[in-house]
Amino acid sequence: MKLPYPKLPLSGRALTAGAVAVVTLAAGGSVAGAASAAERSGPASGTAAVAAAPDLPIANVKAHLAQFQSIATANGGNRAHGRPGYKASLDYVKAKLDAAGFTTSIQQFTASGRTGYNLIADWPGGDANQVVMAGSHLDSVGSGPGINDNASGSAAVLETALAVARSGYQPTKHLRFAWWGAEELGLVGSRYYVNRLSSADRAKISGYLNFDMIGSPNPGYFVYDDDPTIEKTFKDYFAGIGVSTEIETEGDGRSDHAPFKNVGVPVGGLFSGADYRKTSAQAAKWGGTAGQPFDRCYHSSCDTTANINDTALNRNGDAIAYAIWELSQ
């Protein structure tokens, strides 16, 4: 997630609690140990869409994170725009998607004197006039490997796409996945993509789902409130596993949903928090440490694979898969 400019004062950051079930953790308990039987089995619902949505394997998502970490380590410690680590990250994702049967394309652009790339992957089939799209930015800042920000979102979106292929899922709507370049420079890649869509093509996108930082080490569970249908889909999932959510405000306008929203595309997404500090009320319902940032390594060299909360990554990853299945019926 790119740095805001200018940054809002603290008084403008009030978070609104979502009206869903609250999980109360024992004092001093870890959120990582709070998964319930209901969570492991998914939301208790008899709808076909819920039954069809897979449990996204957390081991697979973490394997992608390990690959992104290795790529950063081998390329100057980062995966930033215009650097070798970014292109290596893109090549890794593309190879996985090509092998799984996606139709992939690379979009090239220039920002800050360096070449950038977006990766777009379409799952064959579905109504091309109704496109459900999920995306995440693939670039890190220059100061670190960017594993929570945003290998976490990139890995979960990748694993969701691979789950589509493994299951042979044939949705009514067309599925498209995207990995954006140069988000950290000001949403450059996603803006480039949106600006080159015709008005007719924009109208075909029935929803864009954005995932930027979903494994924060002191996590919150935040849901974008931009589109009511998408928002309800995510809230229903979390309510079904007994996890409270709040409305996402910290990242408003700071990630790749913004260019889509600005041209009238319905948007939504998930977020586990960046450099805002967790309140005592939030710690009471989510666990973790009050008074500390959701991600103390935000935009820092310590944003490594050690900077991930597995429970948050698992819950958010499963929520992504649930939403993709639910919204593409």
Image: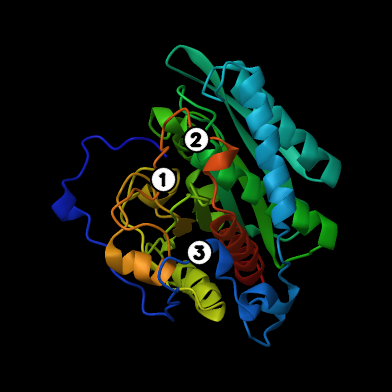
Q: Name the residue under label 1.
A: 295
Q: Image height check: is 92 above or below 243? A: above
Which sits in the foreground, 168 or 198?
Answer: 168
Spatial separation of the CA atoms under disc 2 and disc 3 = 20 Å
**Tag 1: residue type?**
Asp
- What is the quadrant of the C terminus in the image? bottom right
**Whole-percent x, y for residue 262 in the image:** 36, 48
Q: Residues within 10 Å of mark 3 (few under 14, many from 20)?
A: many
**Whole-percent x, y for residue 76 in the image:** 57, 16
Element type at marker 3?
helix
Q: Image height check: is 53 above or below 211? A: below
Spatial separation of the CA atoms under disc 1 and disc 3 = 15 Å
Element type at marker 2?
loop
Say the numbered circle drawn on residue 31: 3
Sequence order check, earlier mark of 1 and 3 = 3
Q: Do the residues labelled 2 and 1 touch (CB within 8 Å)?
A: yes
Q: Residue at x 54, y 44 (%)?
A: 136
Q: Residue at x 36, y 73 (%)?
A: 18
**Res 182 visible:** yes
Q: Which residue is drawn at 17% across and 50% down?
A: 10
Q: Residue at x 44, y 36 (%)?
A: 191
Q: Name the residue under label 2.
A: 303
**Whole-percent x, y for residue 307 in the image:** 52, 42
Spatial separation of the CA atoms under disc 2 and disc 1 = 9 Å
**Whole-percent x, y for residue 268 in the image:** 46, 59
